[in-house]
Image: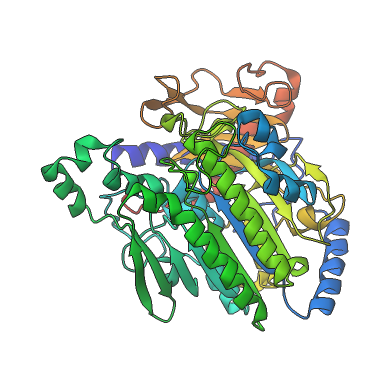
Protein backbone atom coordinates (compact mmCIF):
# COMPACT_ATOMS: atom_id res chain seq x y z
CA UNK A 1 0.00 0.00 0.00
CA UNK A 2 1.43 3.40 -0.96
CA UNK A 3 1.91 6.02 1.73
CA UNK A 4 -0.83 8.15 0.14
CA UNK A 5 -3.30 5.31 0.32
CA UNK A 6 -2.26 4.68 3.88
CA UNK A 7 -2.85 8.33 4.78
CA UNK A 8 -6.29 8.18 3.24
CA UNK A 9 -7.13 4.93 5.00
CA UNK A 10 -6.01 6.42 8.32
CA UNK A 11 -8.13 9.51 7.76
CA UNK A 12 -11.17 7.45 6.88
CA UNK A 13 -10.74 5.16 9.85
CA UNK A 14 -10.21 8.11 12.17
CA UNK A 15 -13.31 9.81 10.82
CA UNK A 16 -15.22 6.56 10.95
CA UNK A 17 -14.27 6.07 14.55
CA UNK A 18 -15.76 9.46 15.38
CA UNK A 19 -18.68 9.00 13.04
CA UNK A 20 -19.84 5.59 14.13
CA UNK A 21 -20.56 6.92 17.61
CA UNK A 22 -22.22 10.09 16.34
CA UNK A 23 -23.78 9.03 13.03
CA UNK A 24 -26.29 11.72 12.05
CA UNK A 25 -25.65 13.36 15.40
CA UNK A 26 -26.16 16.93 14.31
CA UNK A 27 -29.41 18.48 15.41
CA UNK A 28 -30.17 19.85 11.96
CA UNK A 29 -30.08 16.50 10.19
CA UNK A 30 -33.58 15.32 9.21
CA UNK A 31 -32.56 12.36 7.05
CA UNK A 32 -33.18 8.71 7.83
CA UNK A 33 -31.13 5.72 6.77
CA UNK A 34 -33.31 2.84 5.64
CA UNK A 35 -30.55 0.62 4.23
CA UNK A 36 -26.87 0.32 5.13
CA UNK A 37 -26.03 0.60 1.44
CA UNK A 38 -28.19 3.62 0.62
CA UNK A 39 -27.60 7.30 1.31
CA UNK A 40 -30.04 8.56 3.98
CA UNK A 41 -32.96 10.64 2.70
CA UNK A 42 -35.39 13.08 4.28
CA UNK A 43 -38.78 11.34 4.60
CA UNK A 44 -41.56 13.22 2.81
CA UNK A 45 -44.34 10.63 2.63
CA UNK A 46 -47.18 12.95 1.59
CA UNK A 47 -45.11 14.47 -1.18
CA UNK A 48 -44.07 10.98 -2.37
CA UNK A 49 -47.67 9.74 -2.40
CA UNK A 50 -48.97 12.77 -4.29
CA UNK A 51 -46.31 12.35 -6.95
CA UNK A 52 -46.87 8.60 -7.21
CA UNK A 53 -50.53 9.35 -8.00
CA UNK A 54 -49.49 11.98 -10.55
CA UNK A 55 -47.15 9.52 -12.27
CA UNK A 56 -49.78 6.78 -12.26
CA UNK A 57 -52.27 9.14 -13.93
CA UNK A 58 -49.71 9.99 -16.61
CA UNK A 59 -48.92 6.31 -17.20
CA UNK A 60 -52.63 5.60 -17.63
CA UNK A 61 -52.78 8.34 -20.25
CA UNK A 62 -49.53 7.66 -22.13
CA UNK A 63 -49.47 3.87 -21.74
CA UNK A 64 -45.68 3.99 -21.42
CA UNK A 65 -43.07 4.59 -18.76
CA UNK A 66 -41.63 8.12 -19.01
CA UNK A 67 -38.67 8.98 -21.22
CA UNK A 68 -35.61 10.50 -19.60
CA UNK A 69 -33.39 13.02 -21.41
CA UNK A 70 -30.22 14.46 -19.91
CA UNK A 71 -28.66 17.44 -21.68
CA UNK A 72 -25.16 17.66 -20.26
CA UNK A 73 -23.03 20.66 -21.21
CA UNK A 74 -19.28 20.34 -20.64
CA UNK A 75 -17.68 22.87 -18.25
CA UNK A 76 -20.48 25.45 -18.47
CA UNK A 77 -20.37 27.90 -15.57
CA UNK A 78 -23.13 28.44 -13.03
CA UNK A 79 -23.20 32.08 -14.17
CA UNK A 80 -23.48 31.43 -17.90
CA UNK A 81 -27.23 30.91 -18.46
CA UNK A 82 -29.35 34.04 -18.31
CA UNK A 83 -31.66 32.30 -15.86
CA UNK A 84 -28.68 32.02 -13.49
CA UNK A 85 -27.67 35.69 -13.75
CA UNK A 86 -25.57 35.36 -16.92
CA UNK A 87 -26.90 35.49 -20.48
CA UNK A 88 -26.99 39.03 -21.79
CA UNK A 89 -25.03 40.30 -18.78
CA UNK A 90 -22.02 38.15 -19.77
CA UNK A 91 -22.24 38.50 -23.52
CA UNK A 92 -24.04 35.34 -24.63
CA UNK A 93 -27.80 35.05 -24.46
CA UNK A 94 -29.35 31.68 -23.58
CA UNK A 95 -33.04 31.97 -24.51
CA UNK A 96 -33.61 28.21 -24.78
CA UNK A 97 -32.24 27.32 -21.35
CA UNK A 98 -34.03 30.33 -19.87
CA UNK A 99 -37.31 29.20 -21.42
CA UNK A 100 -36.95 25.73 -19.92
CA UNK A 101 -36.04 27.20 -16.53
CA UNK A 102 -39.08 29.49 -16.61
CA UNK A 103 -41.34 26.60 -17.64
CA UNK A 104 -39.89 24.17 -15.10
CA UNK A 105 -37.82 23.95 -11.93
CA UNK A 106 -34.61 25.96 -11.55
CA UNK A 107 -32.31 24.44 -8.94
CA UNK A 108 -29.94 26.96 -7.36
CA UNK A 109 -27.95 24.42 -5.33
CA UNK A 110 -27.29 21.58 -7.77
CA UNK A 111 -23.87 19.98 -7.38
CA UNK A 112 -21.55 18.12 -9.72
CA UNK A 113 -18.17 16.57 -8.96
CA UNK A 114 -15.28 18.91 -9.69
CA UNK A 115 -14.21 17.43 -13.06
CA UNK A 116 -15.63 15.57 -16.08
CA UNK A 117 -15.02 11.84 -15.58
CA UNK A 118 -15.98 11.88 -11.88
CA UNK A 119 -19.31 13.60 -12.56
CA UNK A 120 -20.23 11.53 -15.60
CA UNK A 121 -19.46 8.24 -13.89
CA UNK A 122 -21.25 9.32 -10.70
CA UNK A 123 -24.40 10.18 -12.67
CA UNK A 124 -24.36 6.78 -14.36
CA UNK A 125 -23.60 4.70 -11.24
CA UNK A 126 -25.14 6.74 -8.44
CA UNK A 127 -21.81 6.37 -6.69
CA UNK A 128 -19.08 8.76 -5.62
CA UNK A 129 -15.94 8.65 -7.76
CA UNK A 130 -13.88 7.48 -4.77
CA UNK A 131 -16.06 4.34 -4.67
CA UNK A 132 -15.74 3.52 -8.39
CA UNK A 133 -12.11 4.62 -8.67
CA UNK A 134 -12.94 7.20 -11.36
CA UNK A 135 -11.55 10.03 -9.27
CA UNK A 136 -10.16 12.22 -12.04
CA UNK A 137 -10.43 12.64 -15.83
CA UNK A 138 -8.90 9.86 -17.90
CA UNK A 139 -6.29 11.58 -20.08
CA UNK A 140 -4.15 10.66 -23.08
CA UNK A 141 -1.55 8.11 -22.01
CA UNK A 142 -3.39 6.89 -18.91
CA UNK A 143 -3.32 3.12 -18.54
CA UNK A 144 -5.89 1.89 -16.06
CA UNK A 145 -4.96 -1.20 -14.07
CA UNK A 146 -8.56 -2.22 -13.46
CA UNK A 147 -11.64 -1.73 -15.61
CA UNK A 148 -13.65 0.67 -13.41
CA UNK A 149 -16.89 -0.74 -14.81
CA UNK A 150 -16.18 -4.20 -13.41
CA UNK A 151 -18.44 -4.58 -10.41
CA UNK A 152 -20.49 -1.51 -11.34
CA UNK A 153 -24.09 -1.48 -12.55
CA UNK A 154 -24.71 1.37 -14.94
CA UNK A 155 -27.96 3.27 -15.22
CA UNK A 156 -28.48 2.24 -18.88
CA UNK A 157 -28.08 -1.40 -17.84
CA UNK A 158 -30.81 -1.05 -15.21
CA UNK A 159 -33.07 0.94 -17.54
CA UNK A 160 -32.47 -1.52 -20.38
CA UNK A 161 -33.62 -4.37 -18.13
CA UNK A 162 -36.65 -2.27 -17.21
CA UNK A 163 -37.67 -2.05 -20.87
CA UNK A 164 -35.93 1.11 -22.08
CA UNK A 165 -34.00 1.95 -25.23
CA UNK A 166 -30.80 3.58 -24.01
CA UNK A 167 -28.61 5.93 -25.99
CA UNK A 168 -25.60 8.13 -25.38
CA UNK A 169 -24.79 10.84 -27.90
CA UNK A 170 -21.62 12.93 -27.59
CA UNK A 171 -18.79 12.94 -25.11
CA UNK A 172 -18.13 9.80 -23.07
CA UNK A 173 -14.86 10.24 -21.16
CA UNK A 174 -15.25 7.22 -18.90
CA UNK A 175 -12.71 4.97 -20.61
CA UNK A 176 -12.02 4.12 -24.25
CA UNK A 177 -10.26 0.80 -23.71
CA UNK A 178 -11.87 -2.60 -24.28
CA UNK A 179 -14.78 -3.22 -21.95
CA UNK A 180 -15.12 0.43 -20.89
CA UNK A 181 -16.99 1.93 -23.83
CA UNK A 182 -20.63 3.02 -23.61
CA UNK A 183 -22.02 0.15 -25.69
CA UNK A 184 -20.06 -2.30 -23.52
CA UNK A 185 -21.35 -1.03 -20.18
CA UNK A 186 -25.08 -0.86 -20.80
CA UNK A 187 -26.01 1.60 -23.55
CA UNK A 188 -27.84 0.09 -26.54
CA UNK A 189 -26.31 2.67 -28.85
CA UNK A 190 -23.53 5.24 -28.82
CA UNK A 191 -22.74 8.03 -31.27
CA UNK A 192 -19.95 10.32 -30.18
CA UNK A 193 -16.36 10.92 -29.16
CA UNK A 194 -14.58 9.11 -26.36
CA UNK A 195 -12.55 12.08 -25.08
CA UNK A 196 -12.74 15.80 -24.30
CA UNK A 197 -12.29 18.61 -26.83
CA UNK A 198 -8.89 19.63 -25.54
CA UNK A 199 -7.51 16.12 -26.08
CA UNK A 200 -8.31 16.58 -29.77
CA UNK A 201 -7.41 20.25 -30.26
CA UNK A 202 -3.86 19.49 -29.13
CA UNK A 203 -3.52 17.41 -32.28
CA UNK A 204 -5.06 19.80 -34.81
CA UNK A 205 -4.40 23.40 -33.75
CA UNK A 206 -0.94 24.68 -34.72
CA UNK A 207 -1.82 28.18 -33.48
CA UNK A 208 -2.40 27.01 -29.89
CA UNK A 209 -0.03 24.06 -29.79
CA UNK A 210 2.78 24.77 -32.31
CA UNK A 211 5.42 23.02 -30.20
CA UNK A 212 3.51 19.77 -30.56
CA UNK A 213 1.68 19.99 -33.90
CA UNK A 214 4.63 21.43 -35.89
CA UNK A 215 7.30 19.19 -34.37
CA UNK A 216 7.40 15.85 -36.18
CA UNK A 217 9.21 13.95 -33.43
CA UNK A 218 6.97 15.15 -30.61
CA UNK A 219 3.87 14.68 -32.69
CA UNK A 220 4.84 11.09 -33.54
CA UNK A 221 5.25 10.39 -29.82
CA UNK A 222 1.90 12.01 -29.11
CA UNK A 223 0.25 9.74 -31.66
CA UNK A 224 1.76 6.74 -29.87
CA UNK A 225 -0.41 7.60 -26.87
CA UNK A 226 -3.32 6.37 -28.98
CA UNK A 227 -5.77 9.16 -28.29
CA UNK A 228 -8.88 8.58 -30.38
CA UNK A 229 -10.34 11.50 -32.33
CA UNK A 230 -12.99 9.53 -34.17
CA UNK A 231 -16.73 9.92 -34.24
CA UNK A 232 -17.82 6.41 -33.32
CA UNK A 233 -21.17 4.72 -33.81
CA UNK A 234 -21.39 1.61 -31.67
CA UNK A 235 -24.11 -0.80 -30.60
CA UNK A 236 -24.51 -3.23 -27.74
CA UNK A 237 -24.85 -6.08 -30.25
CA UNK A 238 -21.27 -5.52 -31.47
CA UNK A 239 -21.85 -3.40 -34.56
CA UNK A 240 -19.23 -0.67 -34.58
CA UNK A 241 -18.35 1.95 -37.19
CA UNK A 242 -15.95 4.87 -37.35
CA UNK A 243 -17.97 7.65 -38.98
CA UNK A 244 -15.22 10.26 -39.34
CA UNK A 245 -12.04 11.52 -37.71
CA UNK A 246 -11.43 15.09 -36.58
CA UNK A 247 -8.51 16.47 -38.57
CA UNK A 248 -8.89 20.24 -38.20
CA UNK A 249 -10.25 22.99 -35.99
CA UNK A 250 -13.02 23.36 -38.61
CA UNK A 251 -14.04 19.76 -37.92
CA UNK A 252 -14.08 20.54 -34.21
CA UNK A 253 -16.21 23.64 -34.78
CA UNK A 254 -18.87 21.52 -36.50
CA UNK A 255 -18.78 18.50 -34.17
CA UNK A 256 -21.61 19.47 -31.85
CA UNK A 257 -24.09 20.27 -34.60
CA UNK A 258 -23.44 16.82 -36.10
CA UNK A 259 -24.24 15.26 -32.72
CA UNK A 260 -27.36 17.39 -32.28
CA UNK A 261 -28.67 16.47 -35.72
CA UNK A 262 -28.17 12.82 -34.80
CA UNK A 263 -30.14 13.18 -31.55
CA UNK A 264 -32.91 15.13 -33.27
CA UNK A 265 -33.36 12.40 -35.90
CA UNK A 266 -33.01 9.63 -33.35
CA UNK A 267 -35.75 11.11 -31.15
CA UNK A 268 -38.21 10.79 -34.05
CA UNK A 269 -37.30 7.11 -34.34
CA UNK A 270 -37.29 6.40 -30.59
CA UNK A 271 -40.68 8.08 -30.10
CA UNK A 272 -42.27 5.59 -32.50
CA UNK A 273 -41.00 2.59 -30.54
CA UNK A 274 -43.16 0.72 -28.06
CA UNK A 275 -40.38 1.20 -25.53
CA UNK A 276 -39.61 4.35 -23.53
CA UNK A 277 -36.11 5.80 -23.97
CA UNK A 278 -33.21 7.18 -21.99
CA UNK A 279 -31.09 9.66 -23.95
CA UNK A 280 -27.97 11.24 -22.52
CA UNK A 281 -26.90 13.97 -24.94
CA UNK A 282 -23.45 15.11 -23.80
CA UNK A 283 -22.19 18.18 -25.65
CA UNK A 284 -18.50 18.50 -26.56
CA UNK A 285 -18.72 22.27 -26.09
CA UNK A 286 -18.21 24.42 -24.07
CA UNK A 287 -15.06 22.66 -22.81
CA UNK A 288 -11.91 24.41 -23.93
CA UNK A 289 -10.74 24.56 -26.72
CA UNK A 290 -13.78 26.11 -28.40
CA UNK A 291 -13.90 26.85 -32.13
CA UNK A 292 -17.01 28.68 -33.28
CA UNK A 293 -19.32 26.84 -35.67
CA UNK A 294 -19.60 28.96 -38.87
CA UNK A 295 -23.29 29.63 -38.16
CA UNK A 296 -22.43 31.04 -34.71
CA UNK A 297 -19.07 32.76 -35.26
CA UNK A 298 -19.28 36.27 -33.82
CA UNK A 299 -23.00 35.92 -33.15
CA UNK A 300 -22.74 36.34 -29.40
CA UNK A 301 -22.51 39.92 -28.13
CA UNK A 302 -19.12 39.04 -26.67
CA UNK A 303 -17.72 37.57 -29.95
CA UNK A 304 -15.35 35.32 -28.01
CA UNK A 305 -15.31 31.66 -29.11
CA UNK A 306 -16.48 30.50 -25.66
CA UNK A 307 -19.51 32.77 -25.79
CA UNK A 308 -20.34 31.77 -29.36
CA UNK A 309 -20.17 28.18 -28.11
CA UNK A 310 -22.64 28.92 -25.30
CA UNK A 311 -25.01 30.41 -27.86
CA UNK A 312 -24.62 27.34 -30.08
CA UNK A 313 -25.22 24.85 -27.28
CA UNK A 314 -28.24 26.82 -26.11
CA UNK A 315 -29.64 26.76 -29.66
CA UNK A 316 -29.03 23.00 -29.86
CA UNK A 317 -30.80 22.43 -26.54
CA UNK A 318 -33.74 24.20 -28.15
CA UNK A 319 -33.54 21.93 -31.22
CA UNK A 320 -33.55 18.76 -29.10
CA UNK A 321 -36.53 19.91 -27.02
CA UNK A 322 -38.34 20.90 -30.24
CA UNK A 323 -37.70 17.40 -31.59
CA UNK A 324 -39.31 15.93 -28.46
CA UNK A 325 -42.29 18.22 -28.95
CA UNK A 326 -42.68 17.42 -32.66
CA UNK A 327 -42.40 13.70 -31.90
CA UNK A 328 -45.30 14.11 -29.46
CA UNK A 329 -43.40 12.90 -26.40
CA UNK A 330 -42.75 16.14 -24.50
CA UNK A 331 -45.48 15.41 -21.96
CA UNK A 332 -43.98 12.00 -21.20
CA UNK A 333 -40.35 13.10 -20.90
CA UNK A 334 -38.27 14.43 -18.02
CA UNK A 335 -35.64 16.80 -19.44
CA UNK A 336 -32.72 17.76 -17.21
CA UNK A 337 -30.19 20.40 -18.32
CA UNK A 338 -26.92 20.75 -16.43
CA UNK A 339 -23.14 21.05 -16.59
CA UNK A 340 -20.61 18.45 -15.43
CA UNK A 341 -18.51 20.89 -13.38
CA UNK A 342 -17.74 24.58 -12.95
CA UNK A 343 -15.87 26.71 -15.48
CA UNK A 344 -12.29 25.76 -16.28
CA UNK A 345 -10.65 29.03 -15.36
CA UNK A 346 -7.21 27.72 -16.37
CA UNK A 347 -8.33 28.14 -19.98
CA UNK A 348 -9.47 31.76 -19.65
CA UNK A 349 -10.71 33.56 -21.73
CA UNK A 350 -11.96 30.29 -23.23
CA UNK A 351 -13.93 29.61 -20.06
CA UNK A 352 -17.27 30.22 -18.43
CA UNK A 353 -18.41 32.41 -15.60
CA UNK A 354 -19.24 31.57 -12.01
CA UNK A 355 -20.15 34.06 -9.30
CA UNK A 356 -18.57 31.72 -6.75
CA UNK A 357 -15.04 31.14 -5.47
CA UNK A 358 -12.78 28.79 -7.42
CA UNK A 359 -13.46 26.89 -10.62
CA UNK A 360 -13.30 23.43 -12.16
CA UNK A 361 -10.90 21.17 -10.29
CA UNK A 362 -11.77 22.59 -6.86
CA UNK A 363 -14.33 21.81 -4.21
CA UNK A 364 -15.12 25.49 -3.73
CA UNK A 365 -18.61 26.38 -4.94
CA UNK A 366 -17.15 27.64 -8.23
CA UNK A 367 -15.95 24.15 -9.04
CA UNK A 368 -19.04 22.16 -8.14
CA UNK A 369 -22.20 24.26 -8.09
CA UNK A 370 -23.79 24.01 -11.54
CA UNK A 371 -27.01 25.04 -13.29
CA UNK A 372 -29.72 22.39 -12.89
CA UNK A 373 -32.96 22.79 -14.83
CA UNK A 374 -35.70 20.17 -14.59
CA UNK A 375 -38.38 20.51 -17.25
CA UNK A 376 -41.38 18.25 -17.81
CA UNK A 377 -44.38 19.71 -19.58
CA UNK A 378 -47.51 19.17 -17.52
CA UNK A 379 -45.62 17.45 -14.68
CA UNK A 380 -43.36 20.16 -13.27
CA UNK A 381 -45.09 23.38 -12.34
CA UNK A 382 -43.67 26.32 -14.35
CA UNK A 383 -41.64 28.93 -12.53
CA UNK A 384 -40.48 26.81 -9.62
CA UNK A 385 -37.15 27.71 -8.00
CA UNK A 386 -35.55 25.77 -5.16
CA UNK A 387 -32.35 26.12 -3.17
CA UNK A 388 -32.67 22.65 -1.64
CA UNK A 389 -29.47 20.71 -2.33
CA UNK A 390 -29.38 18.32 -5.26
CA UNK A 391 -26.45 16.13 -6.24
CA UNK A 392 -26.27 15.12 -9.91
CA UNK A 393 -25.88 11.53 -8.65
CA UNK A 394 -29.51 11.85 -7.56
CA UNK A 395 -30.45 11.69 -11.24
CA UNK A 396 -29.40 8.01 -11.12
CA UNK A 397 -31.85 7.06 -8.35
CA UNK A 398 -34.53 9.34 -9.78
CA UNK A 399 -34.27 7.71 -13.22
CA UNK A 400 -34.36 4.22 -11.67
CA UNK A 401 -37.50 5.19 -9.76
CA UNK A 402 -39.22 6.72 -12.80
CA UNK A 403 -38.54 3.47 -14.66
CA UNK A 404 -40.27 1.55 -11.88
CA UNK A 405 -36.99 -0.28 -11.28
CA UNK A 406 -36.25 0.45 -7.59
CA UNK A 407 -35.95 -3.29 -6.98
CA UNK A 408 -33.02 -3.35 -9.42
CA UNK A 409 -30.91 -0.93 -7.34
CA UNK A 410 -27.74 -2.78 -6.32
CA UNK A 411 -27.63 -3.60 -2.61
CA UNK A 412 -24.15 -5.15 -2.51
CA UNK A 413 -22.39 -1.77 -2.62
CA UNK A 414 -22.99 1.76 -1.41
CA UNK A 415 -25.23 4.01 -3.50
CA UNK A 416 -24.68 7.72 -2.82
CA UNK A 417 -27.59 9.03 -4.89
CA UNK A 418 -31.00 9.92 -3.45
CA UNK A 419 -34.32 9.43 -5.23
CA UNK A 420 -35.49 13.02 -5.76
CA UNK A 421 -38.53 12.26 -7.93
CA UNK A 422 -41.05 13.83 -5.59
CA UNK A 423 -38.86 16.90 -5.05
CA UNK A 424 -38.74 17.50 -8.80
CA UNK A 425 -42.37 16.71 -9.58
CA UNK A 426 -44.45 17.98 -6.67
CA UNK A 427 -45.78 21.53 -7.16
CA UNK A 428 -44.30 22.52 -3.79
CA UNK A 429 -41.65 19.80 -3.75
CA UNK A 430 -38.97 19.88 -1.08
CA UNK A 431 -35.56 18.23 -1.37
CA UNK A 432 -34.95 14.77 0.04
CA UNK A 433 -31.17 15.07 0.32
CA UNK A 434 -29.71 16.45 3.55
CA UNK A 435 -25.97 16.60 2.83
CA UNK A 436 -23.71 16.90 -0.18
CA UNK A 437 -20.16 15.57 0.30
CA UNK A 438 -17.26 16.96 -1.70
CA UNK A 439 -14.26 14.83 -2.62
CA UNK A 440 -11.10 15.65 -4.51
CA UNK A 441 -9.60 12.42 -5.82
CA UNK A 442 -9.18 10.33 -2.64
CA UNK A 443 -9.58 13.19 -0.16
CA UNK A 444 -12.82 14.01 1.62
CA UNK A 445 -12.73 17.80 1.46
CA UNK A 446 -16.03 19.31 2.56
CA UNK A 447 -19.72 18.89 3.27
CA UNK A 448 -22.75 21.11 2.73
CA UNK A 449 -25.91 20.86 4.84
CA UNK A 450 -28.61 23.52 4.38
CA UNK A 451 -26.75 26.84 3.96
CA UNK A 452 -23.64 25.68 5.79
CA UNK A 453 -20.51 24.31 4.18
CA UNK A 454 -17.53 23.03 6.11
CA UNK A 455 -14.11 22.36 4.60
CA UNK A 456 -11.47 20.18 6.24
CA UNK A 457 -9.24 20.52 3.19
CA UNK A 458 -9.18 23.16 0.44
CA UNK A 459 -7.59 23.61 -2.97
CA UNK A 460 -5.57 26.79 -3.18
CA UNK A 461 -4.29 28.10 -6.53
CA UNK A 462 -0.82 29.61 -6.69
CA UNK A 463 -1.65 31.77 -9.69
CA UNK A 464 -4.99 33.56 -9.87
CA UNK A 465 -6.91 31.23 -12.19
CA UNK A 466 -4.74 28.13 -12.09
CA UNK A 467 -7.04 25.87 -10.12
CA UNK A 468 -5.89 22.80 -12.05
CA UNK A 469 -2.40 23.49 -13.40
CA UNK A 470 -0.94 25.23 -10.32
CA UNK A 471 -2.81 24.44 -7.14
CA UNK A 472 -2.32 22.41 -4.00
CA UNK A 473 -4.58 20.49 -1.63
CA UNK A 474 -4.12 21.84 1.88
CA UNK A 475 -5.46 21.06 5.32
CA UNK A 476 -7.45 23.91 6.81
CA UNK A 477 -5.14 23.88 9.80
CA UNK A 478 -6.25 24.21 13.40
CA UNK A 479 -10.00 24.09 12.66
CA UNK A 480 -12.32 23.35 9.74
CA UNK A 481 -13.41 26.34 7.68
CA UNK A 482 -17.16 26.78 8.03
CA UNK A 483 -19.08 29.15 5.74
CA UNK A 484 -22.69 30.31 5.69
CA UNK A 485 -23.41 30.34 1.97
CA UNK A 486 -26.44 32.61 2.37
CA UNK A 487 -24.46 35.50 3.83
CA UNK A 488 -21.16 34.57 2.19
CA UNK A 489 -21.70 32.73 -1.10
CA UNK A 490 -18.08 33.34 -2.08
CA UNK A 491 -16.74 31.38 0.93
CA UNK A 492 -14.45 34.11 2.21
CA UNK A 493 -15.63 34.76 5.79
CA UNK A 494 -15.65 31.71 8.08
CA UNK A 495 -18.29 31.62 10.82
CA UNK A 496 -16.85 28.77 12.85
CA UNK A 497 -17.02 30.62 16.15
CA UNK A 498 -20.80 31.12 16.06
CA UNK A 499 -23.39 29.08 17.95
CA UNK A 500 -25.35 28.10 14.82
CA UNK A 501 -22.17 26.60 13.48
CA UNK A 502 -22.06 24.28 16.48
CA UNK A 503 -25.70 23.32 15.86
CA UNK A 504 -24.90 22.39 12.30
CA UNK A 505 -22.12 20.12 13.55
CA UNK A 506 -20.98 19.21 10.12
CA UNK A 507 -17.99 17.27 11.41
CA UNK A 508 -20.37 14.58 12.61
CA UNK A 509 -21.88 14.38 9.14
CA UNK A 510 -18.45 13.81 7.64
CA UNK A 511 -17.78 11.13 10.23
CA UNK A 512 -21.00 9.30 9.43
CA UNK A 513 -20.20 9.57 5.73
CA UNK A 514 -16.68 8.22 6.22
CA UNK A 515 -18.11 5.31 8.20
CA UNK A 516 -19.84 4.06 5.05
CA UNK A 517 -16.39 3.22 3.66
CA UNK A 518 -15.67 0.71 6.43
CA UNK A 519 -17.68 -2.06 4.83
CA UNK A 520 -17.36 -0.77 1.28
CA UNK A 521 -13.79 0.53 0.82
CA UNK A 522 -12.66 2.81 -2.04
CA UNK A 523 -11.66 1.17 -5.32
CA UNK A 524 -8.29 1.92 -6.96
CA UNK A 525 -8.03 1.61 -10.73
CA UNK A 526 -4.61 3.12 -11.43
CA UNK A 527 -5.72 6.72 -11.98
CA1 LIG B 1 -16.30 18.91 -17.74
| Image coords of residue 364 (percent x, y) | 55, 30
Q: Can residue 38 be seen from the camera position used here?
A: no
In the image, what residue occupies the spot 63% across and 16% down?
Answer: 493
Position of residue 218 relative to residue 36, above or below, is above
- Number of dots carrying numbers: 0
| Image coords of residue 131 (percent x, y) | 47, 52
| Image coords of residue 31 (percent x, y) | 74, 47
70 to the left or right of 214: right
Judged from this view, the residue extending furthest toward the bottom is 274
In the image, what residue occupies the spot 69% across and 32% down?
Answer: 85
Q: How did the renderer colour the structure?
A: rainbow
Quarter-of-image position of residue 260:
bottom right
Q: Can residue 363 be seen from the camera position used here?
A: yes
Quarter-of-image position of residue 254:
bottom left
Judged from this view, the residue extending furthest toward the left is 217
| Image coords of residue 183 (percent x, y) | 43, 71
In the image, what residue occupies the spot 74% across and 45% down?
Answer: 106
* Depth order, front residue of 381/28: 381
312 to the left or right of 64: left
Q: In which quarter of the image is the N terminus?
A: top left
Amino acid sequence: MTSRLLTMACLLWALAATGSAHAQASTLNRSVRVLDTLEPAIPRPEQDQAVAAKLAALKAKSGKKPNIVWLLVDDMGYGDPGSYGGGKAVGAETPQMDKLAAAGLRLTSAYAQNTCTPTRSAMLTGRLPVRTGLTRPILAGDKLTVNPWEGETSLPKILGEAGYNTLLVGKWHIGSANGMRPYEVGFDEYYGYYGAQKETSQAVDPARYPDLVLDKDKFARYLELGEDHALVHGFKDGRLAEISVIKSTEDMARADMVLTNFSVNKIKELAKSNKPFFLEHAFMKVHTDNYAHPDFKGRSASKYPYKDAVLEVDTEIGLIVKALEEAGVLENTLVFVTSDNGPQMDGWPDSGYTPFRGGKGTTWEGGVRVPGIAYWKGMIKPGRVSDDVFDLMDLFNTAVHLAGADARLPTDRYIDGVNQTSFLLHDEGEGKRECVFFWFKSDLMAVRMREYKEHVKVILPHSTFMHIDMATVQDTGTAPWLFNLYIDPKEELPVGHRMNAWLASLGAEMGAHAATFKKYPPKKIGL
